[in-house]
Amino acid sequence: MVIDTLDNLEKYVSLNPLFTKAFEYLKSTDLNAQEPGKVVLQGSDLVVNISLAKGKTKEQAQLETHKKFIDIQIPLSCTETMGYTPANALPEGEYNEEKDITKFALPSESYIDVKPGMFAIFFPQDGHAPCISSEETIKKVVVKVLA
């Protein structure tokens, strides 16, 4: 897991070959002006999802893991709390291959506030619980990057 400000995004380009193209898009686009929807940057390997997500309590938020994709999550409209638990600390779960997700109805081991202007990168080894917020709706960007 990586948590940092968007100003430092380029420091992480070496972590995945597709990060260069993803970061170029993120740096050159006014993300706040974008309408919810999907932007395909490189087939199914690199996709940007701009969404309005429902804010959840820590108790409502479910941990999730992905086997094939890395998530780069960027809150736009408000501070979003994200839960974290290492995947190796989670029990076996039912994997949905089509959606590349395993969900867990467990509390996270720790939580961090990610403010607008910041980002979180979750790798396949990172269990994460997104969308924790007192705000009713969170406008956010999630970049799906083939791991």
Image (cartoon, rainbow, N blue to C red):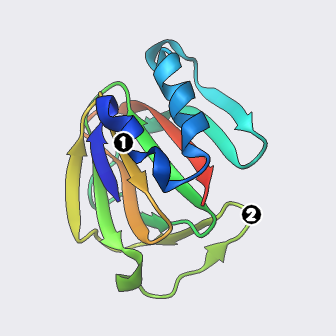
Give the image quarter of residue 86.
bottom left
Classify 30 as above or below 106.
above
Q: Amino acid at mark 2?
A: Glu
Label 1: few (<14), some or many (≥20) within 10 Å? few
Label 2: few (<14), some (14–19) or many (≥20) C-alpha neighbours in 10 Å: few
Name the residue located 43 percent from the left edge and 57 percent from the top edge: 122
Q: N-terminal of the two: label 2 or label 1?
A: 1
Above or below: residue 9 compared with residue 65: above
Q: Position of residue 41 (x, y in %)?
A: 70, 34
Task: Indicate the quadrant containing the N terminus: top left, top right, bottom left or bottom right.
Answer: bottom left
Left or right, 38 with reference to 92: right
Q: Residue at x 37, y 26 (%)?
A: 76
Q: CA distance from mark 2 to mark 1?
A: 32 Å
Query: Is the residue 114 above or below the residue 96 in the image?
Result: above
Residue 83 located left or right of residue 74: left
* Percent x, y of residue 109: 23, 71
Residue 98, label in figure: 2
Left of 7 or right of it: where is 21? right
Q: Which dot, 2 or 1, sits closer to the camera?
A: 1
Q: Quadrant of the C terminus?
A: bottom right
| Residue 108 found in image quarter | bottom left
Q: Position of residue 17 (x, y in %)?
A: 60, 50
- Label 1 sits on what residue type? Lys
* Residue identifier under label 1: 11
Q: Secondary structure at mark 2?
A: loop
Q: What's the residue at 50%, 27% (across, down)?
A: 26
